[in-house]
Image (cartoon, rainbow, N blue to C red):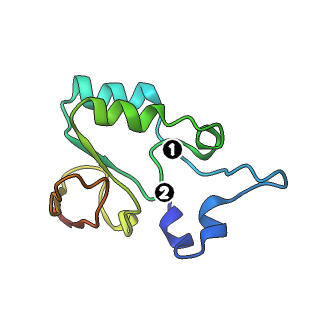
């Protein structure tokens, strides 16, 4: 989506309308179900700050993030340079610490291109 190019401008990332409702892309339940239950992925990543789209977050609806975590899997937020990764054939590597009791932390993510 090239949403990462809006970083570090918080207003551009949120993309709020006149009523203050954020409008940024997110995943759909159908896609996540396919990826996690049919394809067996263990993680998903995106350029925005949330797995759930802005319209859902505005209603305190974090059901997609909750779904991923309930699968005992993880998500990586605020990825950049995804426009440089091909649709298929790349190996994406994510490395990060696992702090006891932590709820979030930075990750080092890179792609090995075919």
Image label count = 2
Q: Where is residue 39 in the image (x, y as percent from the top left)?
A: 21, 29
* Left or right side of 47 for 7: right
Q: Which quarter of the image is occupied by the C terminus? A: bottom left
Residue marked by disc 1:
26
Number of other residues with Cα within 10 Å of mark 1, as a class: few under 14, some 14 to 19, many 20 or more: some
* Left or right side of 110 for 16: right
Q: Position of residue 57 (x, y in %)?
A: 59, 43
Residue marked by disc 2:
48
Helix, strand or loop for disc 2: loop
Q: Residue at (72%, 57%) from the top-left corner?
A: 16
Q: Do the residues labelled 2 and 1 touch (CB within 8 Å)?
A: yes
Residue 111 quadrant: bottom left
In the depicted structure, whether residue 90 falls above or below residue 70? below
The residue positioned farthest toward the front in the image shown: 101
Residue 67 quadrant: top left
Number of other residues with Cα within 10 Å of mark 2, as a class: few under 14, some 14 to 19, many 20 or more: many
Q: Residue at (49%, 37%) from the top-left corner?
A: 62
* Left or right side of 91 for 61: right
Say whether disc 2 or disc 1 marks the residue closer to the N-terminus: 1
Q: Residue at (31%, 57%) from the top-left corner?
A: 104
Q: Position of residue 100 (x, y in %)?
A: 16, 55
The residue positioned farthest toward the right in the image shown: 18
In the image, 41 versus 100, the foreground residue is: 100
Q: Position of residue 90 (x, y in %)?
A: 19, 56
In the image, 86 versus 72, the foreground residue is: 72
Helix, strand or loop for disc 1: loop
**What is the spatial separation of the Cα atoms under label 2 and label 1, in whole angstroms?**
8 Å
Q: Residue at (32%, 35%) from the top-left corner?
A: 68
């Amino acid at each position: 989506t090239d949403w990462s190019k809006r970083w570090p401008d918080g207003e551009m990332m949120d993309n709020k309308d006149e009523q203050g409702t954020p409008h940024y892309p997110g995943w759909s339940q159908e896609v996540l179900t396919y990826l996690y239950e049919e394809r067996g992925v263990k993680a998903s990543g995106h350029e925005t700050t949330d797995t759930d789209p802005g319209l859902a977050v505005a209603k305190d609806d974090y059901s997609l993030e909750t779904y991923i975590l309930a699968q005992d899997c993880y998500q990586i937020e605020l990825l950049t340079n995804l426009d440089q990764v091909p649709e298929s054939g790349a190996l994406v590597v994510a490395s990060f610490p696992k702090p006891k009791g932590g709820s979030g932390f930075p990750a080092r993510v890179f792609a090995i291109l075919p």
